[in-house]
Amino acid sequence: MMVRTMEPVAKKIFKGVLVVELLGVFGAYFLFNKMNTSQDFRQTMSKKFPFILEVYYKSIEQSGMHGVREQDQEKWLNSKN
């Protein structure tokens, strides 16, 4: 009898966890895509969330794309002068 009353609760918890996971995946994709296409957004991220930008740089370097970090730093240094 107790198992039947737990089933709806377990289903709701599972659905909730699934929704949170999907939101996390789509959020991570959106954030990566925004950083991948906008140098200005990467500059904002470097000021507010440098650890997230570091993860972005490491992931693209791991995939074989090199030089993005250097291009960003060069542009940001030149824009300060």
Image (tube, rainbow, N blue to C red):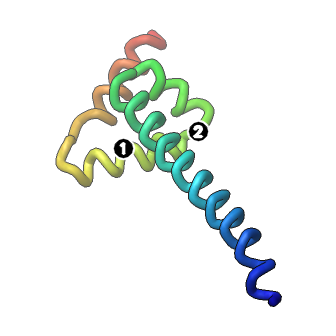
Q: Secondary structure at mark 2?
A: loop
Residue 57 got which mark? 1
Could you tell me which residue is drawn at 47 percent across and 23 percent down? 41
In the rendered view, tell whether residue 1 sits above or below residue 20.
Answer: below
| Residue found at x 22% / y 50% | 63
Within-10-Å neighbours for mark 1: few <14, some 14–19, many 20+: some
Decide if residue 49 is on the left or right side of residue 54. Answer: right
Above or below residue 64? Residue 7 is: below
Instruction: Identify the residue at image location x=23%, y=36%.
Output: 67
Q: Is residue 10 shown left or right of residue 62?
A: right
* Left or right placement of residue 1 versus residue 31 in this view: right
Residue 35's place in the image compared with 54, above or below, is: above
Residue placed furthest toward the left: 64
How far across and how far down the image is residue 55, in percent? 43, 49
Under mark 1, the amino acid is Tyr
Decide which of tag 1 and tag 2 comes sooner along the chain: 2
Question: Is disc 2 surrounded by few (<14), some (14 to 19) or many (20+) residues within 10 Å?
Answer: few
Q: Residue 1's quadrant in the figure?
A: bottom right
Instruction: Return the residue at label 2.
Output: 49
Front one among 57 and 71: 57
Residue 69: assigned label: none
* 11 to 21, vertically: above or below: below
- Left or right: residue 36 versus residue 48 is left
Q: Residue at x 59, y 39 (%)?
A: 49
Looking at the picture, how far across and down is residue 59, in whole percent?
33, 50
Q: Nearer the viewer, residue 57 or 37?
A: 37
* Residue 20 spot, x, y in % from top left: 61, 53
* Front in this rendered view, residue 18 or 34: 18
Q: Quadrant of the C terminus?
A: top left
Q: CA distance from mark 1 to mark 2?
A: 13 Å
Kind of residue at badge 2: Phe
In the picture, residue 35 is in which quadrant? Answer: top left
